Image (spheres, rainbow, N blue to C red):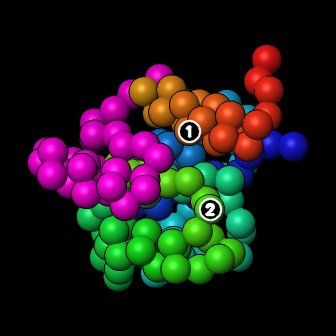
Amino acid sequence: MRSKILVADDEHEVVTTIADILKENNYDVVTAFDGTQVVQMAHKEKPDLIIMDIIMPAGAGIGAYENLKKSSKTAIIPVIFITCDPYEETRNKVTKMGAKGFIYKPFTGEMLLAEIEKVFKGSAMSKGTTIG
């Protein structure tokens, strides 16, 4: 079964680019364009991973992440944050909150896929699953 990834960013071009990369690499993709949609889509679609921008309208990424962590249905979904925010404090904040990955914009497809692989391998290892 293919992994489902929810991609959320207020820039439609970013969402399209990430979605295309993921689809080319055999992931199922669902999308959102603001923080409120992230929470709604996470409950509806039950993705295996969320890739989310930090700076978005209607419940920015951090606010949406806090809402996801409050629900037993979405609290376990790993999140990779993407951002153009250059401040190390932002990265430290979301990491302390439990984010599983962090990517600065601009990024390459290889960087994105490597971060996804790292999250999925870490998740499988924490469940005791053997890989390879």
Q: Nearer the viewer, residue 17 or 124?
A: 124
The answer to whether 95 appears left or right of 24 in the picture is left
Residue 50 in percent (x, y) is at: 54, 56
100 magenta-colored: yes
Residue underneath mark 1: 119
Label ID, residue 76: 2
Quadrant containing the C terminus is top right
Which stretch appears magenta? Answer: 83-110
- Please, is residue 110 above or below residue 59 in the view? above
Classify mark 2: helix, strand or loop.
loop
Q: CA distance from mark 2 to mark 1?
A: 13 Å
Residue positioned 47% across, 23% down in the render = 110
**Res. 24 visible in picture:** no
Up/down of 63 relative to 13, above or below:
below
**x and y percent of residue 114 in the render?**
51, 26
- For label 1, count other residues whose C-alpha is less than 10 Å away and answer few (under 14), some (14-19) or many (20+): some
Q: Which residue is at the far top?
A: 132
Image-based side of 94 in relation to 117, left or right? left
